[in-house]
Image: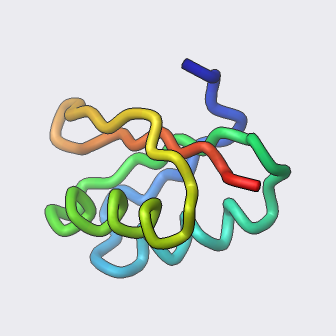
Amino acid sequence: MSNPTETLDALGLLCPLPVLKARKRLNSMPQGAVLRVLADDPAAIIDVPHFCAESGHSLLSQEDADGHQIYVIQKSG
């Protein structure tokens, strides 16, 4: 798996902020870059994969950590 280029700390943010912030950050990153998103909003479990599917980005991994989730997203071309 690719090493994340950047990390977005969205802990404490509620829907839709984690996805909106991820979209904004990905827009400023080069194609193929990898963004790690930390989120503890329960809706993010649905929202982040849906965002990736809708926008064409690749969700490389999704895992539970201590009280939050970690999503690894690769920016598409």
Residue sitting farthest toward the top: 1
Which quadrant holds residue 46?
bottom left
Residue 65 horizontal/vertical position (percent): 23, 31
User: Is 38 left or right of 22, judged from the image as shown?
Assistant: left
Residue 13 horizontal/vertical position (percent): 34, 70
Residue drawn at (40%, 43%) of the image: 71
Figure label count: 0
Residue drawn at (20%, 34%) of the image: 64
Which quadrant holds residue 1?
top right
User: Is 10 left or right of 22, judged from the image as shown?
Assistant: left
Residue 14 horizontal/vertical position (percent): 28, 75
- Of residues 9 and 59, which is closer to you in this image? 59
Q: How is the image coloured?
A: rainbow
Residue drawn at (74%, 67%) of the image: 27
Q: Quadrant of the C terminus?
A: bottom right
User: Is 1 left or right of 46, judged from the image as shown?
Assistant: right
Query: Relative to 45, does residue 63 appear above or below in the rendering?
Result: above
Residue drawn at (75%, 41%) of the image: 32
Residue sitting farthest toward the right: 30
